[in-house]
Structures are given as structure tokens and as C-alpha cells.
Amino acid sequence: MLSKRSQVLEESITLAITALANELKAKGENIISFSAGEPDFDTPQIIKNAAIKAIEKGCGKYTAVAGINEVLKAVQNKLKKDNGLDYELKEIITNVGAKHSLFECIECLVEKGDEVIIPSPYWVSYPEMVKFAEGVPVFIEGLEENGFKITAKQLEKAITAQTKLLILNSPSNPVGSIYSKEELQALAKVLEGTKIMVLSDEMYEKLRYDNVAFDAFASISEDALQRSVTINGLSKCGAMPGWRFGYMASKNQDLISAVKRLQGQSTSNICTITQHAAIPALNGECEQDIENMRKAFQTRRDIGLEILSKIPNISVYKPQGAFYFFVNISRIEKDSMKFCQKLLEKEKVAVVPGVGFGMDGYFRLSYATSDELIKKGLERIAKFIDTYTA
């Protein structure tokens, strides 16, 4: 009865683990959850005020599919100010979160049999979106010693006549690694002379540590700009996960027009109130709130690293951005699902198996929670590992 297309989709493992943890909490279990991929900070007040004002002014009608001019101009200004990118308003569209941006891009670009290169470990939804579009995910393993990032040589080797897209995520989920400008230049050089588009997922752009620089892929060269779809939103760097504000920008006018048609026949415009609320965030009016959040995440990262470094038989990459640890447990258990299930059962700690990110023998731990819970949860994990038997 169901379409074949719908049956290829697997449930998001991060959402499934989070739902299970919440269900156990509701039953009275003392669960510490490190599974959620969202800031635990409240949305900045200036954003809330903009939403309230929009509601009071009666701004609840339909808008143009791409969004109101004010929010499109705010996105345009943000991309110019933060990333040095010049886009016309007609080259920008707002979406129901950056996940929606990615989904619509992939649906409008990928045909049956098209190959999409995805560096691994990857965010869980990338390959599922490609499969839904009847494309073929092609994985390139980023080595741990290289911060789990792919190299230009690996990319060149993976390209075939069927390659349609490359998906890049920097700072990355689940690792927190950031591609340097030199690394992006090397990747961009490989793509010159091809028709391969690049979906650049830059959701964690402002959550960076130790003064590590960030460069948008589209800013690398004119060629990179022409082949890029810059995707971003406010779920992470604006503490607005449930508001569902994402956007894309591309010089490929055919793509933007196709996405508008697809969105026009599915969601129409995104929530009108969310559009108004996003404007101050995009205009930099809550930068201090974001900076306070970033500093707190860096402190939490450092607390977590200190504890994790003392646990025998595991290792962890030091995140440069985002708010995740990707912990290597392969010396004690290669089956990450088995490990995580036992951890939740015995120590009441929820983390996400690495297999969901394309790399078994690891788990992802979100430190988007309090210092106290990080310490308490990692103590439980240390105790669990100390007595672990496969």
C-alpha cells in the first residue's frame, strides 16, 4: 500500500533515542540524556519580543513563498557581513528549518541513479534524503587523525560520471571539526571543470572554540560560489530549534525557482511569525546572547574533555565547533548500538550510537546541557566502561 519511496526511509536515530529517553524520564527513571542536538539555552528575549510584536500587529497572513522582503534582506545582509557573500534577494529562500532546506535542494537536484558524495561520519539525515530522491549515497570516510575530514585526494577518487552533489558540513555534526580555508580551497580545486553542486551545511557556524576561523565554502572562489548552495538557519546559533527557521542561497536561479515551486505546493511560506522573529537574530541584535552561549559550550567542552581523557580504552576528538563529542569505543566494543543500549539500561545515560552517523565503534554525546549533568553523566559512563563486558 505504501510507496516504495516512503519505505526506504529509516527513522532518525537521534530523534528515536531522544524520544526513548524522554519516555523513560516520564516513567520516573533518572535518565541523563546526551542525545538531543539542540541548545539548552532559551531563545534570546529580543527574538521573542519581535515575535510578540508581530502577533500583536496581526502579522499572521500568508506571505510570498520565499518569505517577506524584510527577512530576505536580513539573510542577504547576514551573508554579506559574516561571510562576504553577495546574493540578490531572488537568490534566497526561507525554509522550515535547515533540514527542510536540505530536503528540498536534494529533491530538486537529484534524479534516480545520481550519486551524492557524503563524508562520514555524517549527520544522520543526509543519506536518507538522498535515498528518498532515489539517488545513491557515496560515502568517503574522514579519518580520525585528520579530524574526520575528507581530503582533496579522496574526493577526486570518489567522483564519477554520475556524481551530482557533494554535501559538506562545517562545523560538523557529529564531530565538531571545521574545514580550514586551505582544505576548502583544495576541495574546490578538484571540483573545477565539473558540474557537481555543493550543499554547504553551515548550521553551527557561530559555535566555534579556541578562535578557530570559519569560511563559507561559497566564499572560497568564484567557481565555488557558482556551484554552491549555502544552507543555514537559527536552530543552533540562535537557540531557536522549535521555531523552524532555515534558509538557502544559491546563484543557480533554476534551483531556487524549483525549490519555490516545490515549497509552494507543500508548505507554502514558512511560519509568518517566525519570519518576523528571525530578523533581529539575522541582523546581529542578539550577538551577545550567542557569544554567552558559545562561551558556555566551550567551558562544557573543556569539562567533558578533561573527564573523558581519564577514562581508559576510549579516545575522543577535541571539537572545534558545534556541541558534540564523538567518542571512540572500538577498543572495548565495535557494536555501538549494543553499547548504547546497555549504557541506557544499566546506567540510565542516553547517547547516540555511531552507526547512525556511518561509523560504528563510536557514540555521539551532546554537551548541550548543564555542567553538573555533564559531570554526573560522564561519571556514570566511566563506571559503565570500567565494568563493561561485551
Image (tube, helix red, strand yellow):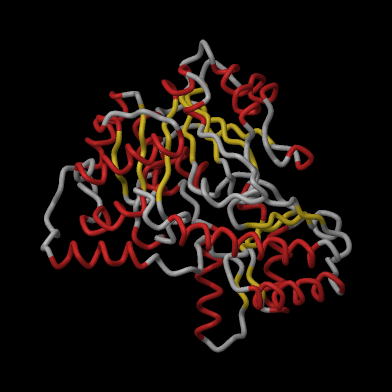
Q: Is 303 displayed left or right of 186 in the figure?
A: right
Q: Is 145 displayed left or right of 263 in the figure?
A: right
Residue drawn at x 22%, y 45% is 70
Residue 38, percent across and down?
50, 62
Q: Is 102 displayed left or right of 73 in the figure?
A: right
Quarter of the image that includes the C terminus: bottom right
Residue farthest toward the bottom in the current orientation of the protein: 28
Above or below, 309 against 347 in this view is above
Residue 165, percent across and down?
49, 27
Residue drawn at x 52%, y 45% is 205
Residue drawn at x 48%, y 47% is 203
Residue 157, percent across and down?
67, 20
Q: Is 191 displayed left or right of 80 in the figure?
A: right
Residue 383, percent across and down?
82, 76
Residue drawn at x 53%, y 62% is 293
Counting every numbered tag in the picture gives: 0
